[in-house]
Amino acid sequence: MRRIRLGVNIDHVATIRNARGEAYPDPSRAAELALVAGADGITAHLREDRRHISDSDIDALAALCRKRGRPLNLEMAVTAEMEAIALAHRPHAACLVPERREEVTTEGGLDVAGQHNRVAPVVANLKAAGIRVSLFIEPDPVQIAAAAAVGAQVVELHTGAYCLAVRERRPDADRLLAALREGAAQAAALGLEVHAGHGIDYETVSAVAVIPEIAELNIGHFLIGEAIFIGLDAAIRRMRALMDAARGEAAA
Ligand code: PXP
């Protein structure tokens, strides 16, 4: 089976930095370390309220990824401001996400089906600038079809509901995993590259990574938390090994 890529989201290094208004810990240093530890790319979410990643972090991360020849995946809301920032930086990929200021984290997928006319021009403009466009959506057949219709090249399936159900030992975890499996198959059949992410930890990664159509996982919060105990390098290497084992490959 094809090797699965790991994108490491370093947002929460900035959360810790911003808690004290200091210049450390530096998300770019974490990104550099993540690439050495086995991350294939770096993911960062520049939120409208700049609660973690800042504009200057994006400048630094874009420069780092360019220098290292690795992809930067910019997570962004569908707004004119974020579109302008993406067009100025031209990251390898942009992942369009829903954003509500009062939410603690990205709570659900983007409603592509209900917002076709808002999403379509942004997708077109980013693609025209050579940016690979991903849409962060629920594994819902209607949203997947809408993502294809709007011209996205990639869908990132939201794994948050499944991961939470596993952590809470809820019986609907199996149904939520089946939805991810079916969504990945549907998206791939429509010609979309399939990514997945949100809420993934060591316990949930294998069941997601084994889904054959999934080309990339984006993982952040758990890895940064685990880094407190075992270090970022070891946390990423263990995640990478679990992903490879799920795909039946020898751990890197
Ligand atoms: N993918 C997307 C689109 C996200 O918005 C996030 C959270 O920023 C992640 C992946 C990573 O989620 P987590 O930090 O829970 O691993």
Image (cartoon, helix red, strand yellow):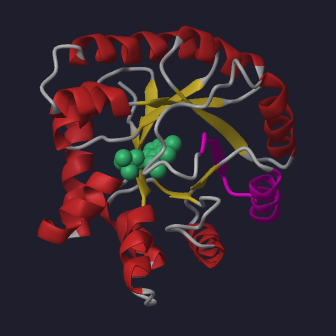
| Residue 88 in the image: above or below residue 21 | above
Residue toward you, 144 or 195: 144
| Residue 149 in the image: above or below residue 219 | above
The answer to whether 211 appears left or right of 93 in the picture is: left
| Residue 35 in the image: above or below residue 5 | below
Q: Is residue 101 magenta?
A: no
Q: Quadrant of the N terminus?
A: top left
Q: How many marks?
A: 0
Quadrant of the image occupied by residue 16:
bottom left
Residue toward you, 234 or 178: 178
Q: Position of residue 236 (x, y in %)?
A: 26, 57
The answer to whether 242 appears left or right of 70 in the picture is: left
| Residue 212 in the image: above or below residue 20 | above
Q: Is residue 93 magenta?
A: yes
Q: Position of residue 188 (x, y in %)?
A: 55, 16
Name the residue rendered at 26%, 33% in the picture. Answer: 164
Q: Position of residue 8 (x, y in %)?
A: 41, 55
Q: Position of residue 191 (x, y in %)?
A: 64, 17
Residue 250 visible from this viewpoint: no
Residue toward you, 143 or 8: 143
Q: Residue furthest bottom?
A: 22
Name the residue rendered at 60%, 16% in the picture. Answer: 144
Residue 122 visible from this viewpoint: yes
Which range is magenta? Answer: 80-99
Name the residue rendered at 74%, 56% in the picture. Answer: 82
The answer to whether 162 appears left or right of 202 in the picture is: right
Q: Residue furthest front?
A: 102
Name the residue rendered at 58%, 67% in the picture. Answer: 50
